[in-house]
Image (tube, rainbow, N blue to C red):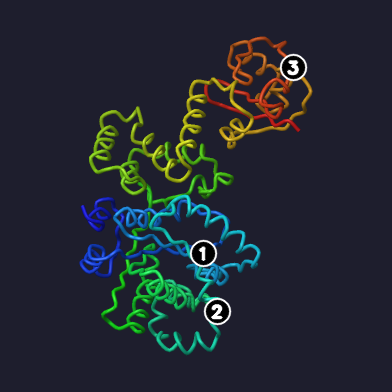
Amino acid sequence: MNFIEDLKWRGALNQVTDETGLLEAMSNEKIGAYVGTDPTADSLHLGHLIPFMVLKRFQNAGGKAVIIVGGATGAIGDPRPTTERKLLTQEQLIENEKGITAQVTRLFGDNNTRIVNNNDWLGKLTLTDFLRDYGKLFSINVMLKKDVVASRLETGISFTEFTYQVLQGIDFHELWRREDVKLQIGGSDQWGNITSGIDLIHSLEGNEAKAFGLTIPLMTDSTGKKFGKSEGNAIWLDAKKTSPYTFYQFWLNQNDADVEKYLKYFTFLSAEEIEALAKEVETNPGERLAQRRLAQEVTKFVHGEDAVAEAELLSKALFSGDVAKLSASQIADAFDGVPSFDCTSEVKNIVDLLVEGGVETSKRQAREDVTNGAITINGEKVTSTDFVVDPSKNYDGQYILVRRGKKKYFLGKIQ
């Protein structure tokens, strides 16, 4: 399959301006494609990974991957559907640029990759240059019809955000000129901005100039929910904001109805491998082989093979209940979302600990669960109500891990 056919098979193509022309350009010369991202946070999240997966496939097909970290456009903000973006300080932008640049470098490597900052050219434009060289080439009538602008006309849109599509068009032309970028890749909501850039290139370089646009479908799960959220929280690519274990678990917990789609989109597995895994979902769903492979592949792409090994070690420990030998950092990682309680470093009777920590509602219930073998402390089953918990014995004296029954965990944090 060629680049376009592969995207179609993977469900990763929404619109393309000139499919035949793009494929010809890719076969005749080594062209570049770009994705832009503004440094509105110090990390990318899964939503950003969606266009980057297509850019990576373009790179794997022999093209050059170019990523704009929008130091200039990030200072302005692209239009949201309903409200103005909050402007960031220059210090915030610089810190965000550093974090995102490091992440993008890890995803794409050094070969056939260029990471650029649009402040290098937009930051040098004077207002007079902007109006004379570019403003004359954009029609207000056309700009008003762009979806993201039209949706804001009733509530209001600032001139700053209104001009964003002009700036994005300038980006495309600059990369066309500097890096031989012929293709811009973006989400389905970027179609208007992408075509504005193509029109600008044709205005400045002639109608024969090769420039193409490609957009990606809106990614949703089988229930129609927008992809990339976990209980309302973003899944970040920064290991400090979303740990590799949590990242791995996000993919491992995907529904059977979604896993084939995500294997196609977020992995580089062959059609034969994915079809075999999809068959396993139908014939042997309990094993969750497709989900495990999905979690392995995406975690390896974003965080590396060591992160996969660490995530699987934690998963195995939690499944077996063998948590006594885990480190304090592993405990903090694996049990980040469980109910927690504060406690002191002093030794404490098991019954008192369970009640004071909110694990049990009464001492009577606590004694009953202990004597019935329903309570484990730091991986050790406790059956005596006289048992004394010593926080210094495990996890560097930082945590006490309580399990009630087979699956209900509580994390005591030593203050």
Quadrant location of the C terminus? Answer: top right
SS at circle 3: strand
Residue at x 46%, y 51% (from the top left corner): 46
Q: Going by the picture, which residue comes out furthest to the right? A: 346
Q: Earlier in the sequence, mark 3 or mark 1?
A: 1
Residue at x 48%, y 65% (from the top left corner): 116
Q: Is residue 327 left or right of residue 349?
A: left
Amino acid type indicated by mark 1 = Asp
Q: Mark 3 against mark 1, which lies toward the viewer?
A: 1
Tag shown at residue 38: 1
Tag shown at residue 124: 2
Q: Residues within 10 Å of mark 3 (few under 14, many from 20)?
A: few
Amino acid type indicated by mark 2 = Lys
Measure the C-alpha gap from mark 1 to mark 2: 18 Å
Q: Could you say where residue 237 lies in the image, as x and y percent from the top left?
A: 51, 48
Which of these two is toward me, 170 or 12? 170
**Is residue 283 shown above or below 155?**
above
Q: Residues within 10 Å of mark 2 (few under 14, many from 20)?
A: few
Residue 354: which quarter of the image?
top right
Q: Earlier in the sequence, mark 1 or mark 2?
A: 1
Residue at image mark 3: 349
**Is residue 302 shown above or below 253?**
below
Q: Mark 2 against mark 3, which lies toward the viewer?
A: 2
